[in-house]
């Protein structure tokens, strides 16, 4: 009885935190402050938003009208396609946290992730109806689609700025500065990863050839 | 604009996929004829043209065989070949589908002028009245002879302040319009086509290509030394390589001074259709610009874009360009969409070594090879004839028949985009919008799809107008009435009379 009640309470909290995303995108400064400081956001809701975003992106490939988006299915790798969202997101979260934690940023790694996920809410929120809408327009009305599509991205970008300033308790100038630095940090991480992987390949190749040589001599 | 949106969408998708779509989509074993689909992938196709015969000098019964012939002209059943290397003109008559007979061979003409022989004649044109115009390249003149080879007049080097009087005048290619005006391409003159009035007076240059002015290059030039500047590309218009006048009097001009980048960036045009003012009016509605092969990589030792050597326009506005790089023929329709591409370098029938001229006789094609000294006759196949028939029927307004013919074309080649769009367009004209939309969507023709969809949407709204009004009214009235009921309830609850009772 108590367990089920707890479960219900937890469920209610999840729904509330998901609904809170709608508050965040309309009242960004207030919303993102409360998100971490008042504990109104949950990881479950953040994950849900991310999954919805990925889902909308995949659905867009199939259900957007061919006037706007043509997919060369022969060369589409759905996992690479999804990675094109998840990988930059992970880089961003790590890069941003890594830098801000050194410069008085109050946000923790998980909070950066949660805030970023909340900030991309406009993407699924606008792109999904837009995807359906795209099937009811002609090329003459294509401008509407383009404009709305840009709005969804711009909105999300502005929300990320607001979110970062609130969870790290930064001034706007410092926020913008650290967003630029975070982008550089992402590049550095990519560089190190590539270096790492090429070293590993070289190393493995070395031992494989060594083994072959030994087998050959035996 | 919409092209740009689509391109941007594509670009975004490419970036998203991390890898652009492959540029190495060559099939290892490609058919003789091919086409490009919406993506630019090569699609094998049944032959549109098939070689009927390849004629050599021996087949014509010539005592002296042809030597690097460069120019050709077709009028009715007559074929005029400029036997450039032998300084003579050969006239052939096509007596049956497969047979040519020599009518006349001449290397001189009658007249009271000093030099009555030809020197490297490189092009020939024959007017409606039968007057013969010859670009007598080696003698720096364009000759006008009557049909019995009597000298009438000649067109000399234009007198123009912009031309250096020292340089030699070498008229290379000519066309003549119905009024007897002569348009000429001369080597080394890049101001456009030289236009002479019918009395021989030079009346100006037409159709010079617009000079592309790159401000980055301009800045570089400011800092460059004299020698560096000389090495840089100068901002001059490009020279044309060949011209053709179609049945309506428009001049098709081709140029081979193009590069891979200039074509891809749409900075250069390999072919232009010039009106009387010299403006380019070629329709470029295809997914790709009109420049022949899309893939310009090194294949079989041939590199770079297609270099158009000659062009001919048939009466259904399909124009065939001859590429001298890979020796291919490219047929485009009036919308600038590729109808067929075929040919190649080689010694087999239907392949060329150095093609120099292409002409048409009805829907048959004639290609002159200046190294092989041969004339290749192409006839349309069943597939090709059906394609042309469907185009003609559409042009004549016989949309039902056109749709049926396109259906037959599709039965022969399921990868032929023009067939799908052709069926769609005929359905569109028959006001069967829903079906037309399907055909357009299959081949990504957004323009026509939108036309069909707009009509379909209009019809749908008109049919369902009652339901739409009911739904809209309901959407407004139901929340409104719910609010009203709630308000009344609330008022009843707080009303004084009820309070007293309780």
Image (cartoon, rainbow, N blue to C red):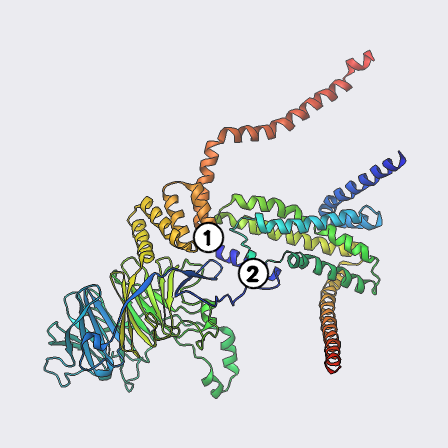
Which residue is more in the foreground, B33 or B417?
B33
* Residue depth check, mark 2 versus mark 1: number of the one nearer the observer: 1
In the rendered view, tell whether residue B490 sits above or below residue B62: above
| Chain label for disc 2 | B
- Asked if residue A38 lies left or right of residue B301, the reply is right
Q: Give me the C-alpha separation between circle 2 and circle 1.
A: 19 Å
In the rendered view, tell whether residue A24 sits above or below residue A210: above
Residue B11 is labelled as 2
Image coords of residue B60 (percent x, y): 19, 74
Residue A11 visible in this rendered orientation of the protein:
yes
* Secondary structure at numbered mark 2: helix
Examine the image and state in which quarter residue B133 appears.
bottom left
Characterize the local packing of mark 2: few (<14), some (14-19) or many (20 or more) Cα atoms within 10 angstroms. Answer: few
**Residue, x 75% and y 61% (percent of image)?**
A173
Image coords of residue B135 (percent x, y): 23, 77
Which residue is more in the foreground, B335 or B228?
B335
- Asked if residue A213 lies left or right of residue B80, the reply is right
Say which quadrant the N terminus of chain A sits in: top right
Residue A172 is labelled as none
Q: Which residue is mark 1?
A: B443
In the rendered view, tell whether residue B104 sits above or below residue B246: below
Same chain assignment for discs 2 and 1: yes
Image coords of residue B14 (percent x, y): 58, 61
- Asked if residue B182 lies left or right of residue A20, the reply is left
Which residue is more in the foreground, B325 or B31?
B31
Image coords of residue B218 (percent x, y): 49, 77
Residue B182 visible in this rendered orientation of the protein:
no
If you read the primary sequence from the N terminus, does the residue marked by circle 2 or circle 1 appear first?
2
């Amino acid at each position: 009885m108590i367990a089920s009640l707890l479960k219900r309470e937890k469920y209610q909290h999840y729904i509330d935190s998901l609904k809170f995303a709608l508050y965040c995108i309309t009242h960004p400064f207030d919303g993102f402050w409360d998100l971490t400081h008042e504990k109104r956001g949950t990881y479950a809701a953040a994950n849900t938003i991310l999954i919805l975003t990925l889902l909308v992106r995949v659905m867009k490939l199939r259900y957007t009208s061919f006037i706007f988006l043509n997919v060369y299915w022969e060369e589409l790798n759905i996992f690479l396609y999804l990675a094109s969202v998840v990988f930059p997101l992970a880089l961003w979260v790590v890069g941003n946290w890594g830098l801000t934690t050194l410069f008085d940023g109050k946000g923790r790694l998980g909070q950066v992730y949660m805030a970023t996920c909340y900030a991309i809410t406009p993407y699924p929120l606008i792109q999904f109806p837009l995807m359906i809408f795209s099937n009811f327009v002609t090329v003459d009305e294509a401008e509407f689609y383009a404009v709305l599509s840009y709005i969804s991205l711009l909105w999300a970008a502005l929300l990320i700025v607001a979110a970062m300033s609130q969870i790290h308790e930064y001034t706007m100038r410092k926020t913008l500065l650290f967003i630029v630095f975070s982008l550089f940090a992402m590049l550095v991480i990519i560089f190190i990863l590539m270096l790492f992987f090429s070293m590993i390949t070289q190393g493995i190749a070395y031992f494989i050839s060594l083994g072959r040589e030994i087998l050959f001599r035996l | 604009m919409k092209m740009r949106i689509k391109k941007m969408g594509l670009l975004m998708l490419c970036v998203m996929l991390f890898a652009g779509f492959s540029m190495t989509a060559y099939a290892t074993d490609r058919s003789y004829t091919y086409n490009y689909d919406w993506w630019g992938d090569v699609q094998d196709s049944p032959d549109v043209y098939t070689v009927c015969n390849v004629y050599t000098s021996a087949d014509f019964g010539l005592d002296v065989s042809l030597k690097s012939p460069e120019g050709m002209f077709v009028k009715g059943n007559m074929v005029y070949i400029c036997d450039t290397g032998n300084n003579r003109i050969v006239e052939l008559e096509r007596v049956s589908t497969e047979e040519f007979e020599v009518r006349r061979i001449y290397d001189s003409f009658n007249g009271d002028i000093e030099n009555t022989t030809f020197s490297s004649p490189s092009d020939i044109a024959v007017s409606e009245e039968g007057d013969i115009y010859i670009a007598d390249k080696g003698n720096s003149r364009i000759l006008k002879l009557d049909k019995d080879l009597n000298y009438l007049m000649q067109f000399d080097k234009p007198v123009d302040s912009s031309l250096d009087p020292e340089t030699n005048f070498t008229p290379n290619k000519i066309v003549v319009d119905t009024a007897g005006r002569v348009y000429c391409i001369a080597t080394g003159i890049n101001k456009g086509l030289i236009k002479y009035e019918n009395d021989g007076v030079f009346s100006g240059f037409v159709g010079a290509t617009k000079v592309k002015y790159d401000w980055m290059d301009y800045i570089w030039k400011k800092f460059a030394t004299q020698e560096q500047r000389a090495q840089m590309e100068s901002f001059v218009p490009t020279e044309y390589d060949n011209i053709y006048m179609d049945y309506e009097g428009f001049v098709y001009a081709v140029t081979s001074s193009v590069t891979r980048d200039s074509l891809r960036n749409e900075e250069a045009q390999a072919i232009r259709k010039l009106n009387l003012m010299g403006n380019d009016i070629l329709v470029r509605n295809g997914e790709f610009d009109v420049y022949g092969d899309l893939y310009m990589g090194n294949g079989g030792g041939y590199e770079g874009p297609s270099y158009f050597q000659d062009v001919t326009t048939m009466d259904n506005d399909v124009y065939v360009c001859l590429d001298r790089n890979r020796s291919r023929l490219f047929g485009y329709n009036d919308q600038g969409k590729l109808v067929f591409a075929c040919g190649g370098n080689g010694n087999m029938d239907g392949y060329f070594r150095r093609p120099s001229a292409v002409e048409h006789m009805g829907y048959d094609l004639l290609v002159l090879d200046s190294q092989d000294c041969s004339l290749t006759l192409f006839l349309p196949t069943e597939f090709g004839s059906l394609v042309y028939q469907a185009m003609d029927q559409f042009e004549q307004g016989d949309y039902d028949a056109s749709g049926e013919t396109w259906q037959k074309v599709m039965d022969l080649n399921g990868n032929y985009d023009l067939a799908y769009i052709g069926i769609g367009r005929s359905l569109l004209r028959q006001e069967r919008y829903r079906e037309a939309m399907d055909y357009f969507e299959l081949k990504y023709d957004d323009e026509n799809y939108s036309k069909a969809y707009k009509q379909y949407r209009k019809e749908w709204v008109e049919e369902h107008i009652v339901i739409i009004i009911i739904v809209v009214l309901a959407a407004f009235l139901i929340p409104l009435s719910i609010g009203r009921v709630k308000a009344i309830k609330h008022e009843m609850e707080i009303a004084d009379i009820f309070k007293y009772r309780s």
